[in-house]
Image (tube, helix red, strand yellow):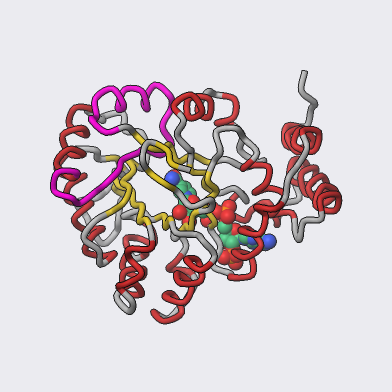
Amino acid sequence: MNTAHFTFSEFVAGFWRLDSWDMTPVQRLNLIEQYLDLGVTTMDHADIYGQYQCETLFGEALALNPAIRQKMQLVSKCGIKPAFDCRPERYVNHYDTSKAHILASVDNSLKQLKTDYLDLLLIHRPDPLMDADEVAEAFNELKQAGKVLHFGVSNFTNAQFSLLASRVDAPLVTNQVEISPLVMNSLHDGTLDLCQQQRIRPMAWSCLGGGSLFGRTDPQATRLLQTLAVIADEVGALDISQVIYAWVRMLPSKPVPIIGSGNIDRINSAIASERITLDKQQWFSIWQASTGHSVP
Ligand code: NAP
């Protein structure tokens, strides 16, 4: 589907955890190629992932077969500056959406990813000190230089989205937000309604709660695990993750789930969830299991 002239694959490959997968460059390349073979062409990064290491690890793999660059859309983010013990000038976690930082961060991402353009750049988190005109200037310069083709945001409220959208020349093509049966804020605070109104697809992060759902024993997780298992049986899903992806994808703003696993069996299962459909009562049973009460 084409949204504001940016086309996402139906699932996105997330590389936040790439540094913890302990893969050789060839294994990383194999993983990327398997994703491409499975039709997952959108690759999600951020400058800071893995303490700035994940883009480097990805770029190292890409350099082994540069021809595949043109088959994928590379997404990266900027705007967060974590504090680091080894960098005393960074003594507190903070945001920086200045033009200078955005330009420098993109140059660094291009260098690490071993590419000369990003398909999509997102402002990672809303910054109370964000000057929307300055961000617009940075976006224009990056677009004119051919370094970034499209722009969007992540974790923005509707007011923050509208502010930035009012100042930038190109339409914002996504808001990347957390969506899962554990975290449903965006379903009820207007975030997904704005995406639907604008006909842009949200990107959904941590659909499986970052994996936490599987090990939790608190009442919410217990209710969810039981309900998801019953529905998995009803719809013939391979596992409860497939039910969760189907639940996220049923939202009318058509969120694009970002897969966070480094395990090829789980990746295959996530993508195969495309064939799973839920009916409305199954969808609301999961909503009810999450909240602990029925809809009014
Ligand atoms: P997720 O899919 O919710 O969580 C992935 C984690 O769950 C992996 O560690 C995976 O381990 C584990 N997992 C999956 N199935 C499991 C199972 N059956 N049992 C136990 N563990 C299981 O996604 P995420 O990694 O949190 O986020 C996905 C992507 O979203 C990230 O890579 C990043 O690109 C993006 N993101 C964006 C933001 C933002 O602020 N914009 C924030 C967070 C993430 P295995 O690898 O062993 O399968």
In this rendering, the answer to whether 135 lies above or below 112 is: above
Residue 150 % position (x, y): 30, 43
Q: Is residue 44 in view?
A: yes
> Image check: 199 left or right of 65?
right
Dividing the image into four equal quarters, which quarter contains ligand 1?
A: bottom right
User: Residue placed at 38% from the left, 37% from the top?
Assistant: 173
From this viewpoint, which residue is outermost toward the top? 296
Q: Is residue 247 left or right of residue 194?
A: right
Residue at coordinates 18% horizontally, 45% vertically from top-left? 142
Tell me where residue 236 sits by quadrant.
Answer: bottom right
Q: Nearer the viewer, residue 50 or 86?
A: 50
Image: magenta residue range: 143-170
Is 259 inside the magenta-drawn segment? Answer: no
Residue 230 position in % (x across, y down):
85, 49
Quadrant of the drawing holding the C terminus: top right
The image position of residue 91, as x and y in percent, is: 26, 48
* Front-lying residue, 237 or 85: 237
Residue 101 visible? The answer is: no
**Eyeballing the image, is 60 above or below 191?**
below
Q: How many marks?
A: 0
Residue drawn at x 44%, y 27% as measured from the top left: 198
Asked whether 87 or 12 is in front, the reply is 12
Q: Is residue 166 magenta?
A: yes
Give left or right: position of 233 versus 204.
right
**Residue at 52% of width from left, 47% of height from top?**
205
Q: In the rendered image of this protein, does residue 100 appear above or below residue 188?
A: below
Image coordinates of residue 207 in percent, x first then y, are: 59, 48
